[in-house]
Image (cartoon, rainbow, N blue to C red):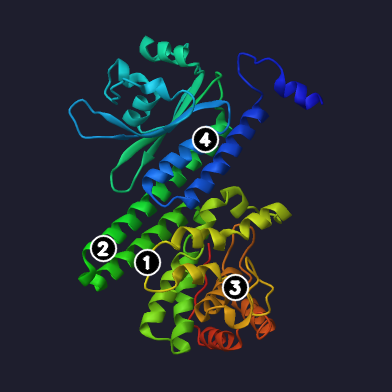
Amino acid sequence: MGMGLAIDSPQSEQGEPELRRKVWAMEASSRCNRALVTAQSVEGLLRGVCEALVLQDRYRLALVAWLEQGEDHPVALAAQAGEARGYLEGVALTWDDVPVGQGPIGRCLREERNVNEPDLVRSQHGTFWRRRAERFGLGSALALPLLCSDGRKGALALYADIPHAFGEQEIALFGELADNLVFGLEALWTREAYQSTLRTHAAQALAQEKALADALEAIAATLEQRDPYTAGHQQHVAELSLRIGMELGLSANRLRGLYLAGIVHDLGKIQIPIEILNKPGSLTALEYELVKQHPKTAHDILKGVAFPWPIAEIIYQHHEYLDGSGYPRALAGEAILLEARILTVADIVESMSSDRPYRAALGIVEARREILRIRGSRLDPEVVDACVRILDRGEFVPQLL
């Protein structure tokens, strides 16, 4: 009861209590992550993120804008949502150093940094935006840069109905969301470019396959930059999977698909907060359930791409066990693809024998002992035997920090 009274009490000059503001930001960020996973187009992603943000009543406007070519440095509105959608109506947005360019969006784009405007009505950056903020009932704003690897530059902006709505924790949460949005956009641009090429240049199938593989490798590199503690993990798993597949005599085409599945097998972890991925202690039951969803998340992201291999399904199955005790679907026996069974063994060996953020490496000997212990029950015996031969020949070097 006491906490409820504290949260609902009249606002102070510094706005709502810090805990309440953080809850708003976490709820909004979580909804946006779901939009990132389910979007099938760039337009759908931008619209979905903006709509997810303004479901929190305190956020009256969310928008994404991009730089365009022109002498007056024009800025184009790509998507927006919220009760204050008329805020930018009739405004020729620019990031030039002129009165219209002094708002949070213009300064964010001009300086390529986060811009937190704690009190729009009392802003020191000109009367133009102060008047519009007062007219539309906007108290504070946060603008975050969207800097893409191909040179495209934009901003994600969020407006609240009270002053001082964005503290350090909120800025950090929405900063991570902006990074994830760039990742999602680049993945969709890659997919759209590939699918367009596939439709218009069917005769160039071989070149398209290489372009797709390069795109997957770029996505893998981007994902690993998000979490430096696991840098190289996917690459090591892919390489060990490839060796196991060769040991088992898989065809060159199947080996190619297996390798590509390996380099993005943890793609679904984009939806999991960094704090959980790198948590030094044990996960809570709720955190573990969230982690267990990452194969499905990756499948949802990749299932719409016309790969010549079942990459989405391989990744979906890479935590399944022969005895049905795995996740997320509790598949068993022959229902699990051979490539997924290979990826499972490689993932266990790499994870155990390499340093992790929460523990030092357990070593190859311990990893070898573990896969032999569950050989035939959880793990495919032929896959385990092939992996053991590779380990015994010294052909796998673990990753040490």
Residue 134 percent location from the top left of the image: 47, 12
Dot 3 crowding, Cα within 10 Å, few <14, some 14–19, many 20+: some
- Measured in 3D between alpha carbons, the distance from the residue under mark 3 to the one under mark 4, in whole angstroms, is 38 Å
Which mark identifies residue 348? 3
- Measured in 3D between alpha carbons, the distance from the residue under mark 2 to the one under mark 4, in whole angstroms, is 35 Å
Residue 164 percent location from the top left of the image: 55, 21
Give the mark, 3 or 4, whose residue is nearer the N terminus. 4
Q: Are marks 2 and 4 in contact (CB under 8 Å)?
A: no
Which mark identifies residue 67? none
- On the image, numbered disc 2 is attached to which residue? 199
Dot 4 crowding, Cα within 10 Å, few <14, some 14–19, many 20+: many
Residue at 56% from the left image edge and 37% from the top image edge: 28
Q: Quadrant of residue 239?
A: bottom left
Q: Quadrant of residue 361?
A: bottom right
Left or right of 19 in this view: 163:
left
Q: Amino acid at mark 2?
A: Arg
Residue 128 percent location from the top left of the image: 36, 12
Dot 2 crowding, Cα within 10 Å, few <14, some 14–19, many 20+: few
Q: Which residue reaches farthest left?
A: 71
Q: For numbered disc 1, what is the local secondary structure?
A: loop
Give the mark, 2 or 1, whose residue is nearer the N terminus. 2
**Foreground: 129 or 242?**
129
